[in-house]
Amino acid sequence: MKRDYKHFPRNGNGNGDVLWGLRTSGDALTDPRLIDFSVIFRSKKEAAEFAGGFGRKYRAEVEHLRKQHQEEGFAWHVGVYLNEVPTYRRITDFEAALKKQAAPLGGRLWGWSANFVPSKDPSVVKEQWWVYLARDPDDGLIASIRLNLGLIIHAPMRGVPILLISGVSYEANSRDANQAKEKMPARTELASLHRASEKRVDLVTSRAKAIHAGACTHANWQFDYFYVADPRGLKKALQKFHRKECPGRRTFFKTQRDPKWKCYLEWLYPNESVIKHHRAELEELGMGWS
């Protein structure tokens, strides 16, 4: 995702960085939500006077801070709340208004925060890719699964209810007995499959409203999994793509309705035993489970 510096500036106030952090975490920043601004004062009188001024138009609450939370003797906190779509200009202008009224009373801005709202727009999702190995319960062979863990906060997305699976065949590595037994490809073959997968993803996501959910390499096949709004035209486009990029390989194409994203949640997403085994690694990625 490329940063748009017009909407997410990088400057001294840090507001653009905070909003960009929300955007890259999977928030489209198009939904109204609670935005709370903090201003601190040394006395209750000053805090109450400030709150009275803003309280006529906005919700403002005064509270006494515990000693461990006080900053340089500023013992009183005023929270001012908006319920709006967060934008850089609105937040920056509102902070300026707060500062203008707080300064004569000895007040100090103390930051702001906003609720996180997971995007339902396929063009704005959290990217958190991870690869793991698991045994297929049907044939007992190893499957290498690569998925976007970040989609878990968005799933399911109503706008893309159709599951599309597309892929090609490969030859197992006959020079390695274990890989041959597990029907896994050699390193050079795997690199070729990855290149084809990248181009396949570009094709699908450029021609349709679509999300790439993950990929699986297993039993002489490499598949990519997408959720799309409308698959029309994609079968023909992928057939043409595979004839050019993957000559001589068998190809696969399938679509089905999956509005609850069962394929992602029950097949691609790691189960409890996988999560337990890789818990430390997943927690380092920022994924947490109770």
Image (cartoon, rainbow, N blue to C red):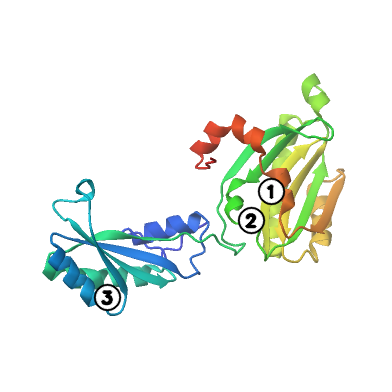
Above/below status of 162 relative to 265: below
Mark 1, mark 3: which one is toward the viewer?
3
- Closer to the camera in the image, 67 or 26: 67
Describe residue 105's horizontal placement relative to residue 170 as left or right. left
The mark nearer the N terminus, 2 or 1, is 2
In the drawing, does residue 39 fall left or right of residue 275? left
Query: Residue type at mark 2?
Result: Ala
Residue at mark 2 to residue at mark 3: CA–CA distance:
39 Å
Residue 52: x and y, percent? 21, 75
Q: Residue at x 38, y 57 (%)?
A: 17
- The residue at the point 59 percent across, 62 percent down is 123
Residue 12 seen in the figure:
no
The location of residue 168, given as percent across then percent down, is 81, 45
Assess disc 3: are there few (<14), some (14-19) or many (≥20) residues with their C-alpha within 10 Å of its C-alpha: some
* Image vertical order of residue 241 relative to residue 268, above or below: below
Q: Is residue 146 left or right of residue 115?
A: right
Secondary structure at numbered mark 3: helix
**Badge 2 vs badge 3, beta-carbon distance below 8 Å:** no
- Report the residue marked by disc 3: 55
For residue 155, the mark is 2
Distance from label 1 to label 3 (Cα)?
A: 46 Å
Type of residue at label 1?
Answer: Leu
Tag 2 near tag 1, CB within 8 Å: yes
Q: Residue at x 73, y 44 (%)?
A: 267
Question: In the rendered image, which residue does mark 1 sit on?
Answer: 265
Residue 243 locus on image (x, y percent): 84, 51
Mark on residue 51? none
Q: Nearer the viewer, residue 17 or 40?
A: 40
Q: Pick whichever of labels 2 and 3 is earlier in the sequence.
A: 3
- State how far apart marks 2 and 1 are (Cα): 8 Å
Q: Is residue 274 visible?
A: yes
